[in-house]
Image (cartoon, coloured by chain):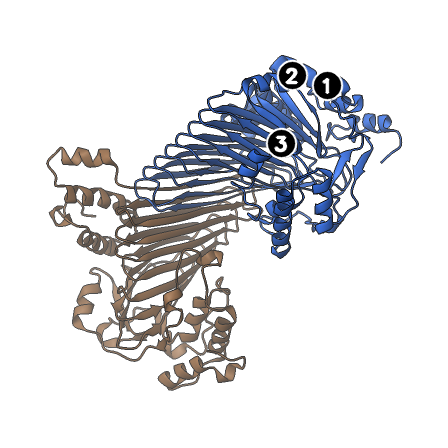
Amino acid sequence: MCTDAIETCPLCDAIEKLSERSMSAQRREACHRMHAIGWPNRKLEAWRYCNLKDIESTQWHPAPLAALSQADLDDFAIDGTAARLVFVNGRFDPTHSSLLPEGVRLLGPLIDETPLDVETPFADDYFAAMSTALVEDGVIIDVPAGVVLPGSIHIMHITEGGCDPIAMTLRILIHVGPSARLGVIETWAGHGTALTTPMTEAHLDEDARLDHARLIEESDETTHLGTIASRQAAGSTFESAILSVGGRIARTRVHASLDGEGGHAAIRGLGMGTDSRHIDNALNVMHASPACTSREYFKNLLDGDSTAAFTGRIHVAHGAQQTDAVQANRNLLLSPTARSWARPQLEIYADDVKCTHGATTGEIEAEALFYLLARGIPEATARSLLAWAFVAEVVDEVPLPALRKHMARRMLGMLPGAERLDEDVVSM
Amino acid sequence: MPDDPNTTLDQWAERSDYKWGFVTDIDADTLPPGLNEEVIRVISARKQEPEWLLQWRLGAYAKWKEMTEPAWGNWPDHDWRPIDYQAISYYSAPKRDEDRPKSLDEVDPKLLETYEKLGIPLEERAALAGVAVDAVFDSVSVATTFRDTLKEAGVIFCSFSEAVQDYPELVQKYLGKVVSRTDNFFAALNAAVFTDGSFAYIPKGVRCPMELSTYFRINQMNTGQFERTLIVADEGSYVSYLEGCTAPQRDENQLHAAVVELIAMEDAEIKYSTIQNWYPGDENGVGGIYNFVTKRGLCAGDRSHVSWTQVETGSAMTWKYPSCILKGDDSVGEFYSVALTNNYQQADTGTKMIHLGKRTRSNVVSKGISAGRGHNTYRGLVKILSGAEHARNYTQCDSMLMGPDCGAHTFPVIEVENPTSQVEHEASTSKIGEDQIFYCNQRGISNEDAVSMIVNGFCREVFAELPMEFAVEAKALLSVSLEDSVG
């Protein structure tokens, strides 16, 4: 696709033609890097469980402009957020968005002067490079010192696909100043054959707090290959939830770096596998400083032919004493053809640390099911109740109230026979 | 090597950091260093092997030449010296081949002295514990005891070379069935050049009347050891096998690439215990043995049982993953491991549990202790295939760290393809707390004893799986290996 000379890259040409302006050097460089890395295959350890073979030969097109349907807006909107920013096919849609809150700017007009991935830990990632090459728009959030933004900002990306397979992305750059606080929810949803490669980078200053969530509700034809990177100064808190309930492939790569003393990172994940969805989460939590805490909780509920892979790495650097890190991956298999793979890894170079990890895989416990059946609860409902109990543990912990409600509704909608569960019983 | 072996022995024996480091000076018939087809033909010819075995070796060698040397698990601090396969001498045998001893009395007294230095006098051990010892000294076995008792029970226990001569049909039937000759780089190398090892066959319904035991020692300068062990337990039989190693002091890295194959038929049980204490290199990380071993057990029949227990305290670098293929329904695989690294040692060990049969169960307990600049890695796979209904796995790997410069790493892989199975993995990391040491000091227990106590408590679950005399030796080994690491 791309030749050695960056100047004559067909992909770059296509992007330029569509956006009617020339690409910046950093984006051209990213495009070049992407081709240098090459399409990943399953022989690579990082891609061992993620099969991209059937989309390898797909000719991806930069996404054309499109209009958002009211039905989509209703479907994917989350009630109770402070602001909503809507993007369609990688570009901002002002008509369906609220006014930009203070400290929030659009990346689109600033794309050429904004450093896009200066500090990215994903230099070896094909799709991270693709994301930089393709990015046309996004959000820059800068919360000044001590400011606490009320509610949360909902960034909604909707794919409106046509006949051609399209590729698109957004870049979300977040900076939370000292002792400031922010909540951000991302939604990735839409229709049509698409490849989405979102990248979010968060920088947290001392004692800052960011509550973040990425909700993947893509269509069954969409391959979602996203990345999240965070850097934390001393005493800061980063909470993130990755909720994978849609997409043909929903893969998220996270790199959380605890750079300052006493930082806390909690990354939670929930995957709902139906049909042949593949849920893939690859995490790397870097404990670079002493006295930091980190939590990774990932749960997958797998039905149909769905598969889930979890690769978690806790890296405790030399000298990062008093580290407290926990990593857990739990998989509940609901069908005989569902599969799960787990690689919970620890790499420790300091002695005064507390690190634990655990991974379990199994089906619904017969005893628990019997208990409910014996009390006259129909089997489908009983199963859904137990499945709900399994996922609720993750949803309950998401520190964004608006999203919790939305998720509960969404999850219950996906569980067979769950309409019988009183919403009050499971209310968040 | 110095001229006067006795002086050397005494000198070495005085050293506290490796009290079992000494070289026995026996003239050995050694091939010049180098590896090619001719060397393999010579080894095969010296051992008077049948043609099929030579071809088997040559096939492995052809494949090995195309393979690339693995390079994982090399952690910081360790100065990896590449292995020069052409600098290794692939055959070494005690020279007096024609008058090989028929009983203990005929064994070279110098050899017996060596064993005494080890603290495991052959006759005493044999008499007290009822252990049959097929002692492997370098590459040719020189003493076998209790052969008669075993023969009465119908148990075959001999060196691999003898098995090739006396029971060729058994060897041909089972050799390479669990670890194929092209399984991996080091297994292929072993298949091409292995010189000896042990062979055991337990016939149907026989409970082996004693624990089988082999002591390996690396002795010739620049000779890699390529042992091959094959144990077959026929229907309803039981055997417990002990393997222990200590090695003399060396300044150059030596390669040890053994292959162990276990086959358990219906209702059979094999218990395989190892204490590995090859020379770990000095306190600056110079020298030491590279221990790259392939060990695998096949639970071929229903209700068969393979159990691995290992205590790894030696070697500069260990890559070792004793595994179980649970093919028979209701078969059981177990792995219990203690790995200790001090100074610049690196241990990369773990297991693979492959569940194929219905209701198969596996249990993995791994304890890693890192001190000094040592790195300890658990690397394991639990795979439940789609046909393994109601399979069950429990894995626990705990790490203990001593000192700010060591490392403990855990890389498990869990692949589940059957929903009725239950798989659990747990891991934790801890250190010896200053408060624990203080508590012991208060009660008049020295730092060293306190550390030893705490470490032994940490490893208790694994030691419980070892045969009694091995457990005692293991405890002593840990204490010696940890001297001066705390306080």
Q: Amino acid at mark 3?
A: Ala
Residue at 52% in and 24% down? B239
Disc 2: CA contacts within 10 A as few (<14), some (14-19) or many (>=20): some
x and y percentages locating residue A148 in the rendered image: 33, 58
Residue at 77% in and 24% down? B111
Q: Amino acid at mark 2?
A: Ala
Q: Please tell me the numbered disc located at residue B163.
A: 3
Disc 3: CA contacts within 10 A as few (<14), some (14-19) or many (>=20): many
Question: Are the residues under badges 1 and 3 in a single subunit?
Answer: yes
Tell me the shade of chain A: brown
Q: Amino acid at mark 1?
A: Leu
Position above or below: B214 against A99? above
Could you tell me how far apart the alpha carbons at marks 3 and 2 are, in whole angstroms? Answer: 22 Å
- In the depicted view, which residue is nearer to us: A311 or A289? A311
The residue beneath circle 2 is B126
Secondary structure of the residue carrying tag 2 is helix
- Asked whether, in this view, residue B353 is left or right of residue B421, the answer is right
Q: Please tell me the numbered disc located at residue B104.
A: 1
- Asked whether, in this view, residue B322 is left or right of residue B24, the answer is left
Could you tell me how far apart the alpha carbons at marks 1 and 2 are, in whole angstroms? Answer: 11 Å
- Asked whether, in this view, residue B200 is left or right of residue A402, the answer is right
Question: Are the residues under badges 3 and 2 in a single subunit?
Answer: yes
